[in-house]
Every structure is written in C-alpha cells, then in structure tokens.
Amino acid sequence: MEIKVLFDKLNLDERFLTGWGFSVLVDDCILFDTGEKPSLLLKNMESMGVDISSLTAVVISHDHWDHTGGLWEILSSKERLKVYGCPGFSAGFKNKVGGLKGELIESDKVTEIAKDIYATGEITGEYEGQYMPEQALVVRSDNGLSVITGCAHPGIVKILGKVRETFSTEDIYLVLGGFHLMGSDRRMINVIVDEFRKLGVKKAGPCHCSGDEAESIFRDKYKDDFVQVKAGEIIQI
C-alpha cells in the first residue's frame, strides 16, 4: 500500500505547488484532508495522475480552512462522495457538505472506511482556547499500522494512545502528518520523541504544522527512519 503526498509546504520538484495545509491520498482512493486552496490541490493531483473520479471517500481531520480548502471543488465535481467528519464540526461545514450533495458520515468512534483503513473518530482537542474536535487516519499494511494526522490539536501522543487502545496488538510502523509542535521548546519535543519510542513507532514523518525545530529533532533521533514529507512523494507502507 502507498501514501501519495498531494499537498504540503515542501515539494519534490517544481511540478508540485506548495502552501499551507496538508493532503494525502491513501490506496489511490481515500483522500485525507484537502489543503488550503482547490487550485493548488487539483494541480498537484493532476501532476500525480490522480483523478477525482477515482476517489471513494474524503476524510477531514478537522474543520480548519487549511485542511478543507480543496474539499468544495472535489464535491462539486463528484456528487454523493462520502465525507468522514467529526460530530463536533461546525454547522457551517456540515451544511456545506450537504449542499454540495456529499454524504456526510460523522464518526464518534473508530470507523472502517475501506479494508484496512480506519478513521479514529472524534478526539477531544483545543485550539486558541476553543474546543477543537479532530480525527486521524489509521492504515494497516504488512509492516504494521500507519497513523496519518492533520494537525494533532488533541496532542500527537494522545492520538497515538487512542490508536493503541483500539489496535492494542499491532505495531505502529509510521506516524506522518502535522504534529502541531510549532513554538514548542526542545525539551517538550524530546519528551514526545521519547513517547514515540515507548510506543514502538518505527518511522516518523512530521510535516505541515510540526515546525522546523520538531522536524530537525525527529530527523536527528530517527535517522534513516525519518520520513521527509513533500508534495509529490510516494511513501510505501
């Protein structure tokens, strides 16, 4: 199985546009988050040979513009597409999905999306003092579990704890996505890396809102098992 990185702040080469936000495609049919702007996402999808018609579902980690920006164009191009959100998402988000004839599925617990692909369901988080519900994606492969996060507002370790509760006998192979560690001090980041190790996380790919400091520390600690995330990359899991 593979993860195609459709959007992030870094790119593989000049064919791929960059910006603020995040988006990946799992198993060539499950879209996780949609970046900040439809034009950027769609150009990168075209560059990777990804057609909207191939999508069977979109999973939105949380209701922020830099993760939902491309969703509306996707839904305008393909009606009745399943959209997995959280019950705590805004009424505005839910109404807009419905207005574009998307099939909204609100997951408050671990939900199977396709064979070996799961949404964690809503996990309690906070952003700027306000409640911020968020979910992650869990993908099972021969190597173990891969956990994909949008921004990890609930805390990346808390999200992994949730995954461990449900998939208690399975190894965590890769954790990839936004870890929301911008502005965190080195001590805290090192504590989080230590928690990754305790949880047995084999590979780590912090990007988006993880911050340069965190990406540097994870790179130093994980060495060859550090995964550099760039738009245009195809990550084998």
Image (cartoon, rainbow, N blue to C red):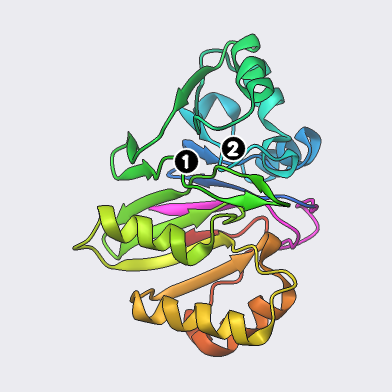
Q: Residue at x 39, y 59 (%)?
A: 146
> Considering only vertical position in the picture, is 227 above or below 165?
below
Do callouts 2 and 1 mark residues in contact (Cβ within 8 Å)?
yes
Disc 1 marks a residue whose amino acid type is Asp
Quadrant, the C terminus: bottom left
Q: Residues within 10 Å of mark 2 (few under 14, many from 20)?
A: some
Query: Which residue is at the front of the view, 112 or 9?
Result: 112
SS assignment for the magenta stretch, majority: loop
Q: Is residue 237 visible?
A: no
Query: Which residue is at the front of the view, 190 or 24?
Result: 190
> Considering only vertical position in the picture, is 219 above or below 178?
below
Looking at the picture, how far across and down is residue 118, in whole percent?
36, 43
Gap in Å between the C-alphas at discs 2 and 1?
A: 8 Å
Disc number at residue 145?
A: none
Query: What residue is shown with label 1?
Result: 28
Query: Which residue is at the front of the view, 33 or 159?
Result: 159
Query: What residue is shown with label 2?
Result: 50
Task: Based on the picture, tell me whether residue 10 belongs to the magenta stretch.
Answer: yes
Q: Residue at x 55, y 51 (%)?
A: 4
Point out the stretch of residues depicted in magenta. Answer: 1-19
Left or right: 207 as drawn, with respect to 194: right
Looking at the picture, how far across and down is residue 21, in whole percent?
72, 50
